[in-house]
Image (cartoon, rainbow, N blue to C red):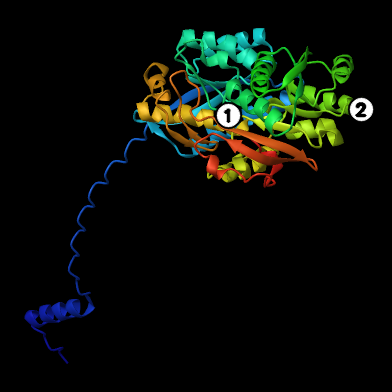
């Protein structure tokens, strides 16, 4: 039997159908995505600059607690200023505090002053003592550096004719007038004995107290002196006891006032005791103990915890550094005044921003900061305190643009450590 012959055309057709049946349907190609737009270049970071601010106070010796208090106030201000990331002349400024110890010694004070000048600081806060502040001021003036003292109260500091010297608290003329008048008018003193420690601060304040007490009608029955490092005062106190004064005034610091008060009590001296800002501190209470009860003292300023901006400072400072002694709020304001002047001048160059310091109108922790033509603070306030049950209690405040914010007479201060 013969096989049937399939024509070639049918074979080709079958192969074609088979290929179509086994093949996959070709999908259309998706359009290529459009290229993403080029990302905008990130803005270049602003340049940074380090600005050094000097601070000087005694960090060793009998009043080192006051010096550290000052320095800590300045450090807190630097930290707060840096937190704001301030921009001056197109640069982000980082402030740095250079702290120096002058040991409350005038010669050492000039040495560290030159050290800060050589370190190219932009300004200086300090010194604590008038005796170191005054000689150091000549060095800063020659270098053209603004110097703001938070605690030196001797009038001579700003009477030298330098355009670089400023202070953020009342001077001894203002304070001495209040102390001397208060001793006579409010404490009933007819006979006053005066002791000073022979420093520029202690003697300067004592001189002003003597003038004011005499003007108010008192008689100065004794004028004795000691040193800022002495601890035995029985010889001069025995001489004073024989004069039977109504009031004894000390021009000196708390390191002298504490032991002196104990010896006054031991000798049975009945005179009331008063002193200035250098002894108006928690440390005086600590050193004198029960002998400090009833002491009248003054501070060249208003109670910080009674000022609109004071309470935050008290909270921030005590949280970071502990108890406030006296001057740390003024150190804080001194730093901020320098920073504020730099911002207004748009320059950290002392040559350019120094003129702005004199034009300051700054709302500080301690009140309104404005300077007169000499560099003294305008409307310098004085607060009178009494020590009761181991605490500084506000009696009255005089002067100051924020005097209305002070505590009413005889009202206890909210926090004894917050004074001045």
Helix, strand or loop at label 2? It is loop
Q: Report the front residue among 54 and 204.
A: 204
Q: Nearer the viewer, mark 2 or mark 1?
A: 2
User: Furthest residue to the front?
Assistant: 217
Q: Write down the quadrant of residue 76 in the picture.
A: top right
Left or right: residue 348 versus residue 235 is left
Q: Write down the quadrant of residue 10 in the picture.
A: bottom left
Q: Using the rendered image of the protein, determine whether residue 152 is visible from the camera's viewpoint.
A: no
Classify 10 Å Cα crowding around label 1: few (below 14), some (14-19), many (20 and above).
many
Q: Which residue is drawn at 67% across and 21% down?
A: 209
* Whole-percent x, y for residue 324 in the image: 68, 36
Q: Using the rendered image of the protein, determine whether residue 90 is visible from the camera's viewpoint.
A: yes
Q: Write down the quadrant of residue 55 in the picture.
A: top right
* Whole-percent x, y for residue 371 in the image: 46, 25
Q: Which residue is drawn at 70% across and 28% down?
A: 184
Q: How many numbered tags mark residues here?
A: 2
Q: Name the residue under label 2.
A: 268
Left or right: residue 278 versus residue 35 is right
Instruction: Specify the quadrant that holds the C terminus.
Output: top right
Classify 10 Å Cα crowding around label 2: few (below 14), some (14-19), many (20 and above).
few
Q: Name the residue under label 1.
A: 331
Precedes in sequence: disc 2 or disc 1: 2
* Whole-percent x, y for residue 58 in the image: 68, 20
Instruction: Specify the quadrant that holds the N terminus.
Output: bottom left
User: Furthest residue to the bottom?
Assistant: 1
Helix, strand or loop at label 1? It is helix
Q: How far apart are marks 2 and 1 (CA)?
A: 39 Å
Q: Report the front residue among 165 and 195.
A: 195
Q: Residue 14 carries which label?
A: none
* Whole-percent x, y for residue 290 in the image: 86, 36
Q: Is residue 24 above or below residue 312?
A: below
């Amino acid at each position: 039997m013969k096989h049937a012959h399939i024509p070639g055309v049918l074979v080709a057709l079958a192969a074609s159908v088979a290929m179509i049946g086994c093949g996959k349907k070709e999908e259309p190609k998706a359009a290529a995505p459009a290229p993403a737009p080029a990302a905008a270049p990130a803005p270049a970071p602003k340049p940074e600059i380090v600005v050094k601010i000097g601070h000087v106070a005694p960090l060793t010796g009998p009043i080192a607690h006051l010096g550290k208090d000052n320095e800590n106030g300045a450090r807190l201000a630097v930290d707060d200023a840096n937190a704001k990331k301030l921009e001056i002349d197109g640069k982000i400024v980082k402030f740095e505090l250079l702290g120096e110890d002058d040991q409350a010694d005038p010669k050492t004070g000039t040495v560290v002053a030159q050290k800060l000048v050589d370190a190219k600081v932009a300004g200086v806060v300090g010194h604590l003592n008038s005796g170191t502040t005054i000689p150091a001021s000549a060095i800063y003036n020659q270098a053209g550096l603004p110097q703001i003292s938070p605690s030196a109260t001797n009038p001579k500091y700003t009477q030298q004719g330098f355009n670089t010297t400023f202070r953020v608290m009342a001077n001894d003329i203002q304070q001495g007038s209040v102390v001397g008048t208060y001793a006579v008018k409010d404490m009933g003193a007819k006979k006053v004995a005066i002791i000073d420690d022979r420093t520029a601060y202690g003697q300067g304040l004592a001189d002003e107290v003597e003038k004011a007490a005499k003007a108010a009608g008192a008689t100065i029955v004794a004028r004795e002196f000691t040193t800022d490092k002495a601890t035995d005062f029985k010889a001069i106190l025995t001489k004073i006891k024989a004069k039977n004064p109504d009031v004894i005034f000390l021009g000196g610091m708390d390191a002298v006032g504490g032991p002196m008060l104990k010896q006054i009590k031991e000798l049975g001296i009945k005179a009331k005791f008063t002193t200035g800002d250098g002894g108006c501190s928690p440390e005086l209470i600590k050193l004198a103990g029960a002998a400090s009860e009833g002491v009248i003292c003054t501070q060249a300023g208003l109670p910080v915890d009674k000022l609109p901006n004071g309470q935050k400072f008290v909270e921030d400072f005590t949280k970071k550094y502990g108890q406030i002694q006296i001057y740390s709020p003024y150190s804080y304001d001194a730093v901020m005044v320098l920073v504020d002047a730099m911002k207004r001048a748009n320059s950290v160059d002392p040559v350019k921003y120094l003129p702005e310091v004199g034009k300051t109108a700054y709302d500080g922790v301690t009140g309104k900061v404005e300077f007169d033509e000499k560099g003294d603070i305008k409307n310098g306030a004085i607060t009178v305190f009494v020590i009761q049950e181991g605490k500084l209690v506000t009696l009255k405040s005089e002067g100051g643009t924020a005097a209305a914010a002070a505590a009413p007479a005889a009202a206890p201060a909210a926090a004894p450590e917050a004074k001045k």
